[in-house]
Image (cartoon, helix red, strand yellow):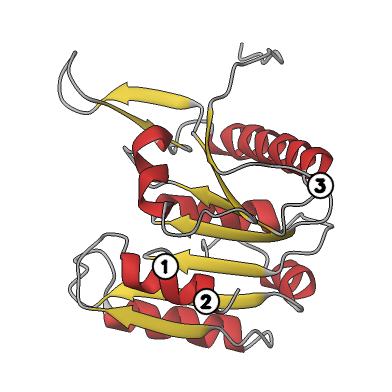
Amino acid sequence: MHRTIQVSRTAHLHQLGELTPHTQHVWLVLHGYGQLAKYFVRHFEVLADETTAVLAPEALSRFYLQGFNGRVGATWMTKEERLHEIHDYIGYLNAVYEQVRSEAPHAQLHVLGFSQGAATACRWLAQAHWPVTEFVLWAGVFPEDMEMTAAQQNLANTRLTYVYGLQDEFVADDRVQEQLNRVRQVGLQPKIITFEGKHELNAEVLLHLKKFS
Protein backbone atom coordinates (compact mmCIF):
# COMPACT_ATOMS: atom_id res chain seq x y z
CA MET A 1 0.00 0.00 0.00
CA HIS A 2 1.33 3.40 -0.99
CA ARG A 3 0.18 6.39 1.05
CA THR A 4 1.14 10.08 1.10
CA ILE A 5 1.10 12.71 3.81
CA GLN A 6 1.63 16.47 3.63
CA VAL A 7 4.54 17.75 5.73
CA SER A 8 6.15 21.13 6.34
CA ARG A 9 9.63 21.79 4.96
CA THR A 10 12.25 24.46 5.57
CA ALA A 11 13.21 25.98 2.23
CA HIS A 12 16.28 28.13 1.62
CA LEU A 13 16.48 31.30 -0.46
CA HIS A 14 19.53 33.39 -1.28
CA GLN A 15 19.09 37.04 -2.11
CA LEU A 16 21.01 39.96 -3.60
CA GLY A 17 19.70 43.46 -2.97
CA GLU A 18 16.71 44.59 -0.96
CA LEU A 19 13.01 43.85 -1.29
CA THR A 20 11.16 47.06 -0.40
CA PRO A 21 8.16 49.04 -1.65
CA HIS A 22 10.69 51.00 -3.73
CA THR A 23 12.10 47.94 -5.51
CA GLN A 24 11.37 48.20 -9.23
CA HIS A 25 12.61 44.83 -10.50
CA VAL A 26 12.83 41.38 -8.92
CA TRP A 27 14.67 38.56 -10.68
CA LEU A 28 13.61 35.11 -9.52
CA VAL A 29 16.36 32.74 -10.72
CA LEU A 30 16.13 28.94 -10.63
CA HIS A 31 19.32 26.89 -10.58
CA GLY A 32 20.15 23.78 -12.55
CA TYR A 33 20.59 20.15 -11.53
CA GLY A 34 23.23 19.58 -8.86
CA GLN A 35 23.71 23.25 -8.02
CA LEU A 36 23.19 25.15 -4.78
CA ALA A 37 21.46 28.52 -4.65
CA LYS A 38 24.14 30.18 -2.49
CA TYR A 39 26.69 29.69 -5.27
CA PHE A 40 24.29 30.09 -8.19
CA VAL A 41 23.10 33.52 -7.04
CA ARG A 42 26.64 34.94 -7.23
CA HIS A 43 26.43 34.89 -11.03
CA PHE A 44 23.70 37.52 -10.83
CA GLU A 45 25.62 40.20 -8.93
CA VAL A 46 25.71 42.16 -12.20
CA LEU A 47 21.92 42.55 -11.99
CA ALA A 48 21.51 43.75 -8.41
CA ASP A 49 21.42 47.48 -7.64
CA GLU A 50 19.41 49.95 -5.55
CA THR A 51 16.21 49.22 -7.52
CA THR A 52 16.78 45.57 -8.48
CA ALA A 53 16.83 42.48 -6.26
CA VAL A 54 17.68 38.90 -7.15
CA LEU A 55 16.17 35.95 -5.32
CA ALA A 56 17.43 32.37 -5.81
CA PRO A 57 15.23 29.66 -4.26
CA GLU A 58 16.99 26.37 -3.69
CA ALA A 59 15.38 23.09 -4.74
CA LEU A 60 14.05 21.02 -1.85
CA SER A 61 16.02 17.81 -2.51
CA ARG A 62 19.76 17.65 -1.84
CA PHE A 63 22.27 14.88 -2.49
CA TYR A 64 26.00 14.18 -2.52
CA LEU A 65 27.39 14.81 -5.98
CA GLN A 66 29.87 11.94 -5.66
CA GLY A 67 29.61 9.00 -3.30
CA PHE A 68 28.54 9.50 0.30
CA ASN A 69 30.29 12.73 1.27
CA GLY A 70 31.89 15.84 -0.13
CA ARG A 71 30.15 18.40 -2.32
CA VAL A 72 26.38 18.65 -2.16
CA GLY A 73 23.95 19.64 -4.91
CA ALA A 74 20.20 20.05 -5.18
CA THR A 75 17.59 18.91 -7.67
CA TRP A 76 14.07 20.12 -8.37
CA MET A 77 12.78 16.63 -9.13
CA THR A 78 13.57 13.14 -10.35
CA LYS A 79 11.46 10.60 -12.22
CA GLU A 80 10.42 8.99 -8.90
CA GLU A 81 6.97 10.26 -7.85
CA ARG A 82 7.54 13.12 -10.28
CA LEU A 83 3.99 14.48 -10.21
CA HIS A 84 4.14 14.88 -6.44
CA GLU A 85 7.51 16.61 -6.70
CA ILE A 86 6.19 18.96 -9.38
CA HIS A 87 3.15 19.74 -7.22
CA ASP A 88 5.42 20.42 -4.23
CA TYR A 89 7.82 22.76 -6.00
CA ILE A 90 4.97 24.68 -7.64
CA GLY A 91 3.49 25.25 -4.19
CA TYR A 92 6.92 26.26 -2.92
CA LEU A 93 7.50 28.77 -5.72
CA ASN A 94 3.99 30.16 -5.29
CA ALA A 95 4.87 30.85 -1.65
CA VAL A 96 8.10 32.55 -2.74
CA TYR A 97 6.14 34.73 -5.15
CA GLU A 98 3.66 35.72 -2.43
CA GLN A 99 6.56 36.68 -0.17
CA VAL A 100 8.10 38.80 -2.91
CA ARG A 101 4.82 40.56 -3.61
CA SER A 102 4.30 41.32 0.07
CA GLU A 103 7.76 42.90 0.41
CA ALA A 104 8.09 44.51 -3.05
CA PRO A 105 4.50 45.04 -4.22
CA HIS A 106 5.35 47.40 -7.08
CA ALA A 107 8.24 45.46 -8.63
CA GLN A 108 8.18 43.91 -12.07
CA LEU A 109 8.82 40.16 -12.00
CA HIS A 110 11.59 38.64 -14.13
CA VAL A 111 12.03 34.85 -14.08
CA LEU A 112 15.17 33.07 -15.29
CA GLY A 113 15.49 29.30 -15.34
CA PHE A 114 18.85 27.66 -16.02
CA SER A 115 19.01 24.08 -17.32
CA GLN A 116 16.75 21.96 -15.07
CA GLY A 117 15.55 25.22 -13.57
CA ALA A 118 14.17 26.23 -16.98
CA ALA A 119 11.75 23.28 -17.09
CA THR A 120 10.89 23.96 -13.45
CA ALA A 121 10.09 27.60 -14.23
CA CYS A 122 7.99 26.55 -17.24
CA ARG A 123 5.79 24.25 -15.19
CA TRP A 124 5.44 26.88 -12.49
CA LEU A 125 4.53 29.72 -14.84
CA ALA A 126 2.05 27.52 -16.72
CA GLN A 127 -0.24 27.78 -13.68
CA ALA A 128 0.56 31.41 -12.82
CA HIS A 129 -2.21 33.99 -12.69
CA TRP A 130 -0.10 37.09 -12.25
CA PRO A 131 1.89 39.28 -14.67
CA VAL A 132 5.43 38.21 -15.55
CA THR A 133 7.41 40.93 -17.28
CA GLU A 134 10.16 38.66 -18.57
CA PHE A 135 10.91 34.95 -18.76
CA VAL A 136 14.39 33.74 -19.74
CA LEU A 137 14.99 30.08 -20.56
CA TRP A 138 18.74 29.57 -20.33
CA ALA A 139 20.22 26.30 -21.61
CA GLY A 140 16.88 24.61 -21.03
CA VAL A 141 13.66 23.77 -22.80
CA PHE A 142 9.91 23.75 -22.40
CA PRO A 143 9.22 20.30 -20.89
CA GLU A 144 7.44 17.82 -23.11
CA ASP A 145 4.57 17.45 -20.64
CA MET A 146 3.86 21.17 -20.53
CA GLU A 147 0.47 22.28 -21.80
CA MET A 148 1.45 24.85 -24.43
CA THR A 149 -2.02 26.38 -24.60
CA ALA A 150 -1.76 27.29 -20.93
CA ALA A 151 1.74 28.62 -21.53
CA GLN A 152 0.51 30.81 -24.37
CA GLN A 153 -2.28 32.23 -22.25
CA ASN A 154 -0.05 32.99 -19.28
CA LEU A 155 2.98 34.24 -21.23
CA ALA A 156 1.20 36.14 -24.01
CA ASN A 157 2.29 39.49 -22.57
CA THR A 158 5.66 38.30 -21.28
CA ARG A 159 8.98 39.11 -22.93
CA LEU A 160 10.33 35.64 -23.73
CA THR A 161 14.05 35.01 -24.33
CA TYR A 162 15.92 31.80 -25.10
CA VAL A 163 19.66 31.81 -24.26
CA TYR A 164 22.27 29.15 -24.86
CA GLY A 165 26.00 28.75 -25.42
CA LEU A 166 27.11 27.74 -28.88
CA GLN A 167 29.38 25.06 -27.39
CA ASP A 168 26.79 23.75 -24.93
CA GLU A 169 27.07 19.97 -25.03
CA PHE A 170 23.55 19.59 -23.63
CA VAL A 171 21.78 21.87 -26.12
CA ALA A 172 21.77 20.49 -29.66
CA ASP A 173 20.81 22.88 -32.45
CA ASP A 174 18.12 20.55 -33.80
CA ARG A 175 16.53 20.44 -30.33
CA VAL A 176 16.58 24.24 -30.21
CA GLN A 177 14.81 24.46 -33.56
CA GLU A 178 12.27 21.87 -32.44
CA GLN A 179 11.57 23.96 -29.35
CA LEU A 180 11.24 27.17 -31.35
CA ASN A 181 8.77 25.54 -33.74
CA ARG A 182 6.74 24.26 -30.80
CA VAL A 183 6.40 27.62 -29.06
CA ARG A 184 5.84 29.54 -32.29
CA GLN A 185 2.93 27.26 -33.18
CA VAL A 186 1.02 28.66 -30.20
CA GLY A 187 1.92 32.25 -31.00
CA LEU A 188 4.89 32.81 -28.70
CA GLN A 189 7.87 34.57 -30.30
CA PRO A 190 10.99 34.20 -28.16
CA LYS A 191 14.07 36.30 -28.74
CA ILE A 192 17.17 34.15 -29.28
CA ILE A 193 20.51 35.08 -27.68
CA THR A 194 23.63 32.96 -28.13
CA PHE A 195 27.15 33.35 -26.79
CA GLU A 196 30.53 31.67 -27.10
CA GLY A 197 30.44 29.23 -24.23
CA LYS A 198 29.29 25.90 -22.85
CA HIS A 199 26.60 24.92 -20.32
CA GLU A 200 27.05 28.01 -18.19
CA LEU A 201 25.85 31.51 -17.41
CA ASN A 202 27.43 34.52 -19.07
CA ALA A 203 27.89 37.94 -17.44
CA GLU A 204 27.76 39.88 -20.71
CA VAL A 205 24.42 38.36 -21.64
CA LEU A 206 23.06 39.07 -18.16
CA LEU A 207 24.10 42.71 -18.50
CA HIS A 208 22.37 42.81 -21.87
CA LEU A 209 19.18 41.47 -20.29
CA LYS A 210 19.42 44.04 -17.49
CA LYS A 211 19.86 46.87 -20.00
CA PHE A 212 16.55 46.04 -21.67
CA SER A 213 14.61 45.13 -18.52
- At horizontal 33% and vertical 65% (from top left) the residue drawn is 203
Q: Secondary structure at mark 3?
A: loop
Residue 19 drawn above or below residue 182: above
User: Which of the pair 151/10 is nearer the observer?
Assistant: 10
Quarter of the picture containing the C terminus is: bottom right
Res 158 → quadrant: bottom right
Instruction: Identify the amino acid type marked 3.
Output: Pro
Percent x, y of residue 84: 62, 32
The residue that mark 2 highlights is 211
Q: Nearer the viewer, residue 40 or 42?
A: 42
Task: Determine the residue positioned at 43% across, 46% down.
Answer: 31
Picture coordinates of residue 56 (x, y %)?
52, 41
Mark closest to the chain's N terminus, 1 or 3:
3
Q: Which mark is residue 206?
A: 1
Q: Earlier in the sequence, mark 3 or mark 2?
A: 3
Which image quadrant: the N terminus?
A: top right
Q: Amino acid at mark 2?
A: Lys
* Circle 1: element type: helix
| Cα distance in 3D space between marks 3 and 2 | 22 Å
Residue 109 on image: x %, y %: 70, 59
Q: Secondary structure at mark 2?
A: helix
Residue 182, image x, y percentages: 55, 82
Quickly name the residue at label 3.
21
Between disc 1 and disc 3, the foreground one is 3
